[in-house]
Image (cartoon, rainbow, N blue to C red):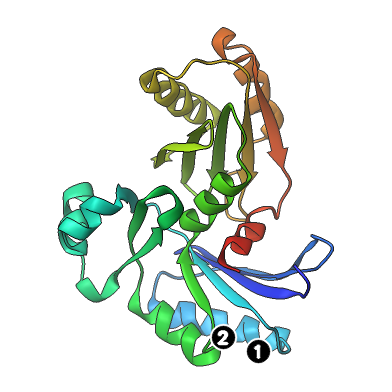
Amino acid sequence: MAESHIVFELSAHSFGVYELKPNNVTDTKGVVTFLSDNEKDQKEQIATLLNELNLGSYDFYSLAWISSQTVFVPSTVHKASDLSTIFSTCFNKEATLSNLDYNSIGEIGVVNVFEIPLWVKSFFVIKYPRIIIQHAFSNILRQSIEKSKLGLELTVVLYKNYFLLEVIHDSKFLFANTFEYTNCDDLLYFVAFTLQQSAIPLLKGKLYFHTSQEAIDIKFAEFSEKWLKIESFKEIQCLEQKVPSLPKFHLSCV
């Protein structure tokens, strides 16, 4: 990465602005927690922060939309169906077609289907016409696949009241889903259940533990200590990724 880039992380709860520098350093420019779930109020908070930051000109702008209602499906399923059918089938709810979008991850033959408020695109494209808008989990999966090695690799990403769990084995994508949580035991349960159902040989592996700015306060040390008490997981090393680690996943867009 030869030059600095500005990346945005946006969810229904918060908005963050980060600069990715050539020396692989992430500089947090500003973060706001939304005071309301009203579209107008959220746009005003975002606009206020951007005006205060007075960002200069950058070669690359990227926005990651963060939400729990996102699903990875095979490219063949995406081609044979439509976004509304896929979304309503997976989440048992109807969505406005203009609020549905998808990201193709061609290298592994899957498509990420998700809901994103229409105002998000219009707001940021007007301000930054060349901006790339992707779902955060698409960025995470691309980077994970690109950097994965032989063996088992897990990625856990904590957000406000849900977390993403991603499973890769021998550089092959096996699973990605979100789960609600309130404490450390919830994380352990869902990760353990997923691994038990996957029938993967639990040999040596790594679990990458990321925490977003808006996440519930769960200590990595507590998670790691409880993880090691599970006999079958002792060979899976837990690695904490320091905040803010998530903006670096935007590099998959470059």
Between 93 and 145, the residue placed more toward the observer is 145
- Residue sitting at 47 percent across and 27 percent down? 191
Picture coordinates of residue 177, whole percent (x, y): 39, 41
| CB contact under 8 Å: marks 2 and 1 | yes
For the view shown, which residue lies furthest in the top direction? 231
Q: Is residue 27 shown above or below 154?
A: below
Q: Mark 2 points at which residue?
A: 47
- Residue sitting at 61 percent across and 57 percent down? 249
Picture coordinates of residue 66, whole percent (x, y): 47, 60
Q: Is residue 124 left or right of residue 100?
A: right
Q: Quadrant of residue 239?
A: top right
Calculate the distance from the C-alpha at mark 2 to the C-alpha at mark 1: 6 Å
Callout 2 environment at 10 Å: few (<14), some (14 to 19), or many (20+)?
few
Q: Name the residue under label 1.
A: 51
- Residue sitting at 36 percent across and 56 percent down? 112
Q: In this view, does 251 lie to the left or right of 94?
A: right
SS at mark 2? helix
Q: What residue type is labelled 2?
A: Ala
- Residue sitting at 47 percent across and 56 percent down? 138
Between 55 and 39, the residue placed more toward the observer is 55
Q: In which quarter of the image is the C terminus?
A: bottom right
